[in-house]
């Protein structure tokens, strides 16, 4: 295996939050390629995280965000982020992630947490609307179903929290669900968003 330097190990640990030996092994296996080593650690970590998915996550924190801006309504958000241990729940990274997700909810206005929460009636309505639009545009019948499937996927990405692209790309480039998975890999615990609530002054609560 390729010899790696302490500086390379430190850089990978800073990037991924991995332990020293895990970072060293990943760099050695990828010939010192920092990006490839990061991907390798993520793949291994996600595999481990999926094995942990059934473990009880009965600790956690409430993240919050309150938005004031002169020309917009006041918006308040709370998010319950759960984990397995009190030690992780009180960590700076975990607390910060909960608040970051709350900030995202204020900006992105998700309607549901996961696909499982989306009512069948909402999907049926969306499919009917997209089908009607495609026919009005003169799209051939044989491709309408593909158009509908593609746009329903976009509907999920727009309205489901875990499938929305995280609002602050400088902190994390990916979906909220992927960010939560990455945090679980870093903390080596089962971590999940359990619920959220968003209130805006003067806004309809059903929006």
Image (spheres, rainbow, N blue to C red):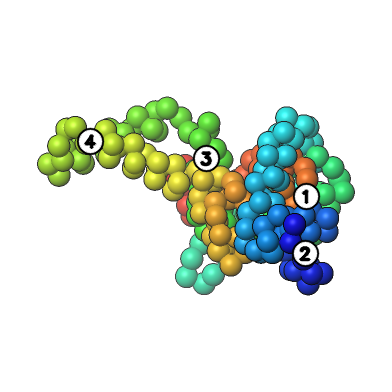
* CA neighbours of label 3 inside 10 A, class few (<14), some (14 to 19), many (20+): some
- Residue at point 72%, 33% (across, down): 51
Most foreground residue, 28 or 125? 28
Which quadrant of the view contains residue 46?
A: top right
Residue 206 placement (x, y as % from top left) = 47, 42
* CA neighbours of label 2 inside 10 A, class few (<14), some (14 to 19), many (20+): few
Of mark 1 and mark 3, the one earlier in the sequence is 3
Of mark 3 and mark 4, the one earlier in the sequence is 3
- Residue at point 48%, 66% (across, down): 72
Q: Is residue 125 left or right of residue 202?
A: left
Question: In terms of secondary structure, where does tag 1 sit?
Answer: helix
- Residue under pointer 3: 112
- Residue at point 21%, 36% (across, down): 143
For the residues bearing labels 3 and 4, Cβ distance under 8 angstroms: no
Question: In terms of secondary structure, where does tag 2 sit?
Answer: loop
Q: Is residue 134 above or below residue 90?
A: above
Residue 85 placement (x, y as % from top left) = 84, 42
Question: In 3D space, how far apart are the residues under numbered discs 3 and 2 (Cα atoms)?
Answer: 48 Å
Mark 1 or mark 3: which is in front? 1
- Residue under pointer 1: 187
Mark carried by residue 144: 4
Residue 54 placement (x, y as % from top left) = 73, 30
Mark 3 or mark 2: which is in front? 2
Of mark 2 and mark 1, the one earlier in the sequence is 2
């Amino acid at each position: 295996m390729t010899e790696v330097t302490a500086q390379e190990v430190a850089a990978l640990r800073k990037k991924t939050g991995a332990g020293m030996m895990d970072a060293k092994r990943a760099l050695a296996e990828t010939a010192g390629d920092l990006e490839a080593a990061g991907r390798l650690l993520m793949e291994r970590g996600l595999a481990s995280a999926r094995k942990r998915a059934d473990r009880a996550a009965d600790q956690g924190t409430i993240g919050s965000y309150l938005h004031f801006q002169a020309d917009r309504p006041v918006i308040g958000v709370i998010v319950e982020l759960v984990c397995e241990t009190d030690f992780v729940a009180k960590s700076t990274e975990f607390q910060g992630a909960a608040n970051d997700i709350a900030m995202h909810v204020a900006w992105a206005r998700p309607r549901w947490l996961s696909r499982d929460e989306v009512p069948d009636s909402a999907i049926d309505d969306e499919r009917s609307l997209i089908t009607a639009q495609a026919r009005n545009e003169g799209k051939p019948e044989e491709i309408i179903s593909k158009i509908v499937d593609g746009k329903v996927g976009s509907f999920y990405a727009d309205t489901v929290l875990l499938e929305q692209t995280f609002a602050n790309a400088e902190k994390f480039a990916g979906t909220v669900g992927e960010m939560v998975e990455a945090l679980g890999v870093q903390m080596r615990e089962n971590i999940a968003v359990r619920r959220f609530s968003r209130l805006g002054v003067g806004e309809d609560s059903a929006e």
